[in-house]
Image (cartoon, helix red, strand yellow):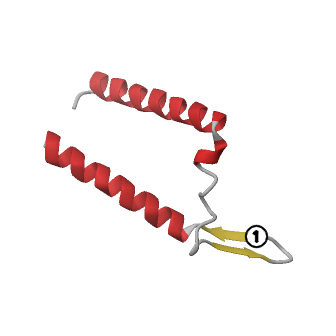
Amino acid sequence: MDLPKSLIALGLLLVALGALAWFLQRYPWLYSWFGNLPGDIRYEGSSGVVFAPLASMLLISAFLSGIGWLVRKFLG
């Protein structure tokens, strides 16, 4: 892929991410589950907080892998 096409693709990706961020800001109940699933680790000590959203990241990874599989199946 040459530079102009790469820049256009990057621009479209940024526009899509901006639209998604705007949409999620208006409807926070859509992502309130993130970080609150069983399996998400949160440790609050006297010197700080450690947060590891393991279950949430596993769910997002499975979702993105499924989308990648669909894209490869129908476009590749």
Between residue 11 and residue 65, name the one nearer to us: 65
Q: Secondary structure at mark 1?
A: strand
Q: Residue 14 location, x and y as percent?
A: 47, 31
Quadrant hosting residue 7 = top left
Residue at 35 percent across and 23 percent down: it is: 8
Quadrant for the N terminus in the image: top left
Q: Residue 69 location, x and y as percent?
A: 23, 53
Q: In the figure, 35 relative to 14: above or below?
A: below
Left or right: 66 with respect to 57?
left
Between residue 33 and residue 62, name the one nearer to us: 33
The residue labelled by disc 1 is: 49
Residue at 59 percent across and 58 percent down: it is: 34
Left or right: 60 with respect to 37?
left
Residue type at the position of mark 1: Val
Q: Residue 17 location, x and y as percent?
A: 49, 35
Q: In the figure, 31 relative to 34: above or below?
A: above
Residue at the extreme right of the image, as rendered: 46
Q: Residue 62 location, x and y as percent?
A: 37, 61
Quadrant for the C terminus in the image: top left
Judge the density around disc 1: few (<14), some (14-19), many (≥20) Cα neighbours within 10 Å. few
Between residue 23 and residue 75, name the one nearer to us: 23
Between residue 30 and residue 6, name the one nearer to us: 30
Left or right: 28 with respect to 5?
right
Residue at 70 percent across and 71 percent down: it is: 50
Count of residue discs: 1
Residue at 65 percent across and 33 percent down: it is: 26
Q: In the figure, 54 relative to 70: above or below?
A: below
